[in-house]
Amino acid sequence: MRLLIKNGRVIDPYSGTDETLDILIDKGKIIDIKPKIDGKDNKVLDASRLVVAPGFIDMHVHLREPGQEDKETIKTGSLAAAKGGFTSVACMPNTNPVNDNCGVTEYILAESKKHAIINIFPIAAITKGLKGEELTDMADLVDSGACAFSDDGQPVQNSQVMRRALEYSKITNVSIIDHCEDKNLSRDGVMHEGYYSYLFGLKGIPAASEETMVSRDIILSEKYQSKIHIAHVSTKGSIDLIRWAKDKKIEVTAEVTPHHLLLTDNLIESYDTNLKVNPPLRSETDKKALLQAIKDGIIDAFATDHAPHTFDEKEVEFNNAPFGIIGLETAVSLLLDKLIHKNIISLQRFISMFSTNPAKILGLKNKGKICVGADADLTILNLQKDILVDTNTFVSKSRNCPFNGWRLKGAPVITIVGGKKVYPFK
Amino acid sequence: MSFKHKHLLGIQALSASDILTILETAESFLEISAREVKKVPTLRGKTIVNLFFEPSTRTRSSFELAAKRLSADIINFSNQTSSVSKGESLKDTVLSLEAMNTDAIIVRHSYAGAPHFISTFCRSHIINAGDGAHEHPTQALLDAFTIKQEKAKFKNLKVVIVGDILHSRVARSNIFLLSKMGAKVVCVGPPAFLPIEFQQFGTQIDYNLDRAIEGADVIMTLRIQLERQQKNSFPSIREYRNIYGLTEERFRKAKKDAIIMHPGPINRGVEISSDLADSLQSIILKQVENGVAVRMAILYLLLGGKDRETSD
């Protein structure tokens, strides 16, 4: 049976659409879009007073499978994504074993087919074992289904290795995603280096550790004419560099996380390990620069860097806690409240950063847009819905979320993947 | 006299009047240690744990004697001989000790915030005996007590703190305390040990000891913490000594009645010349002696008097 979504406010940044339209879906594709489509013979979903957007894509998550299923699995991660309004996620390769060979990529895809209710796109490692030394078999990995490459968390320190990866990506034509961090500058650091790290007696991760690598990547990208995507940008300096690069038409794109847009280093006064994340929560100045950058269109995408860890792992001294914040179930509501209702950016830009742009960066041709022939992945939002973030209601396996107790306006209410309603859960 | 804190986690949380309360209380305890029978029954029946995850000579013994002179029962815990070496978490370790009905836990830990973390799940009073590079409140209080003994005031005293400021919890607690009490604090050390942001704590910073020491009332030298150093913080011990070592010649630029302090342990001949450490102007051992009275005062203010309301 075909699915008809009626009376929704359809916003599609790809075509610039923002009007009340009906969308007809058949066999996982959008087959018609018109102001009025006849409801008979179709299953009808009434989207009155709701916003219908192309399916949201989180291009930076950690699903922990294979190897760390106590933190998250493909199944629970996909449930969390669907609940949070995401129809697709791209998962980072720092699993155990590392996703640096076709076997692991194919395993993730096979498990996703069995257990995931949304689309899972594996990101493969740039280097074998995330060691920063030898390139993985990148072309083979793309054939197996890798959507991008990244050594997230253990970033490539050797500039020659990064250069070779960028050069080779011209053959595979998929993005290199870099977690920019000079590990020599950040060694043993646990929070942003600055007044508050000195005040709290914690070792700092300087802004320079990110910015030196952002500048390296931009220079390599320009010299070797390859695309580079900067993961979770967190500092004003990085923004300045990316702004400069974009002015020069260098093919650099960037993402930002909700926590870097909303939280700052001073909060660590409590030594709450749910605030320990890498890159670290930065200063107020950095946060302001990130907000300005999304206004100016310098940052292309929102991404959560969903990084699940168990309660016990986080219930320790700040130094001993692993880095990471989960974000799939809170990102959309957080940013609807803090960016849309606070009039920081338009809904068009909001949706392009959650959908159209990540689809473009990952090369997902039939996603990130609402048009005839596109995949029927849709995220439906209720801008007025009031919610309370309560980690006890999370479907993710983990609870490491610093937003517990926040009251927010605006929420994803229906998630459709391949023409099927996957959220609300049956 | 009122002291309303449940824990002593750092100087930051204390007001100037809290600090004065502690110092005045310590004054009254000073005499007990000079008695033939060095014991009063004030904390009889209280159980205190010395929970030390890092080595310590002065602080641990000082707390132990303070507790014993107040008739409390105190046990010592060290991580080398405990289940921590079997991989037990800090939380499980503390909860197990607390299950034996402790009243106070004195914590020394190499990680900043460990006592704060413990205070989130513990019923006992928590006393920070040094957490990473964060705070060492009892050291700053005993330093303040000693300065007050010698100088009778804090207002407008020029206190120069020399050394590895960045890694020093003693420096932080002293900066917070002395600034609250109106002293003028100047921090001196090589740039890698003295981030510019320290100015925001209300101190002056200077890379030149010869200049900074002029007119100083108090010079506090800090140990170069070789166990916390990263490579290349400074080129060599030799260069450090030449530029930042407290020598007789440098000390002459301070005020005539200036005093020399050091939280110990000393690297003789590195941050301070051996002769100066043993000189009359050095009150290093006085600091240690006063430590017992100050810690008695803290134990008394936190634990003494069943009916006292405590909040934090």
Image: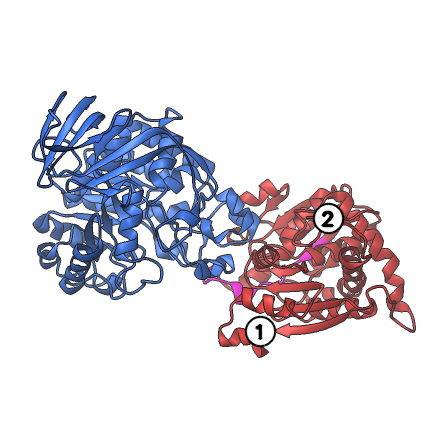
Q: Look at label 2 and name its amino acid.
A: Ala
- Colour given to chain B in the rendered image: red
Question: On residue A139, which mark appears?
Answer: none
Q: Cα distance, mark 1 to mark 2?
A: 40 Å
Residue that badge 2 annotates: B216
Please give the name of the residue rendered at 21% of the width and 64% of the height, measured from the top-left corner.
A128
- Tell me residue B110's x, y (percent): 56, 63
Range covered by the magenta-colored residues: B219-235
Left or right of B256, for residue A418: left
Please give the name of the residue rendered at 89% of the width and 63% of the height, measured from the top-left corner.
B31
Which residue in the rendered view is the most extreme toward the right?
B36
Q: Look at label 1 and name its amino acid.
A: Asn
Whether residue A215 appears in this view of the structure is no
- Tell me residue B171's x, y (percent): 64, 54
Residue that badge 1 annotates: B79
Q: How is the image coloured?
A: by chain
